[in-house]
Amino acid sequence: MLKRLRSQGTHASAVTVPSADTETLAGIDWDNFGFSIHPTDYMYIMKCERGQWQQGELKPYGNLELSPSAGVLNYGQGLFEGLKAYRTFDGRIFLFRPKENAVRMLEGAARMSMDAPSEEMFLSAVRKTVLANQRWIPPSGKGSLYVRPLLIGSGAVLGLAPAPEYSFVVYVSPVGNYFKGGLAPIDLKVETHHHRAAPGGTGGVKTIGNYASVLKAQLEAKSKGYSDVIYLDAVNNHYVEEVSSCNIFIVKDGEISTPELGSILPGVTRKSILELARDQGYKVKERPVSADELMDADEVFCTGTAVVVNPVGSITYKERRTRYNNGGLGKVTKELYKALTEIQMGLSTDKFGWIEEL
């Protein structure tokens, strides 16, 4: 069953896309779907040449063609974002705080000397891509549609300089839980040798180079049975920064603390949890958190678009291992997870104005 979709705004053309008939995806085991790429129907592409953005369009999902001298391939001029679309119990489609992602991409592009789409261009592209692929949004409570906007230096450049052309791409994939086991406590290891970022660097923007550098330590940790690693600051090698792809919080005597911004990513979920916790009456601090405090905490949890809110069951730092809540789910973590996900899935009132309904 097909229908004609004409996207709103000036940056897309009319295309024929599948309807929201979820029966076409019958037979998918959403309960065991996992977090991996699943090609969908359409992606969005828009190009910018020498500061001028062209008209964007929805195209069938497929490969991109790049010059071998593209800025992104030679000098790493690239950014990405991550957000989610949810299907509610009554069939509506929600986006969670997409404006935050648009603003973060603009700020990251300024740091990386890249031309970026405006906030409205970004939001329009995301909306169109989600609607064009809406049949891939999992049923309520079974997962979400992960939305990945990319901004890359696609123009050819030999000497070290900003690319002459940029491509803005949005693609989507249905996903389940990021960590195996769903909302289950994970085991982390504190990395004491490798560092993710340094003061004055690009740790605070979502540039592609931040992620390849964490793979070595992450893979080594996973080979020893850990889920991921926690990075320390590059100056003192003692203050907690973040996990490979998510922010981290500690709870001690009812007070919630998280590392302050600077060389860590300003996560959208991190920001949302800070606002939720304060609204619920918790004392919340953004401050330096030492590795010793981490090991003495009552609860530890991670936040991110992919992981949402995930409890930490244990952390190993040098020769010491701490288990939290006997490896179970802590009270504060459970409360904040419930509050956030119920807003995302339309099960509770969104008094913060975080949800955009498509």
Image (cartoon, rainbow, N blue to C red):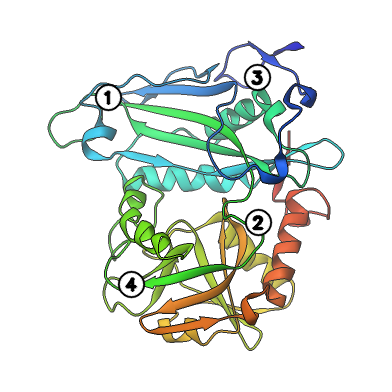
Neighbourhood count class around disc 4 (C-alpha, 10 Å): few under 14, some 14–19, many 20 upward? many
Q: Amino acid at mark 2?
A: Gly
Question: Dot 2 lies on which element?
Answer: loop
Element on which disc 3 rests: loop
* Disc 4 target residue: 233
Please state which of the two labelled residues, at mark 1 or mark 4, is closer to the viewer. 4
Q: Residue at x 57, y 21 (%)?
A: 42
Determine the image quadrant of residue 191.
bottom left
Nearest the eye: 139 or 253: 139
> Where on the picture, by quarter, is residue 23?
top right
Question: Badge 1 is on which residue?
Answer: 155
Please give the residue where the numbered disc 3 appears in the rendered image: 7
The amino acid at mark 3 is Ser
Residue 19 image point, x, y percent: 75, 18
Pointer 1 with pointer 4, Cβ within 8 A = no
Q: Earlier in the sequence, mark 2 or mark 4?
A: 2
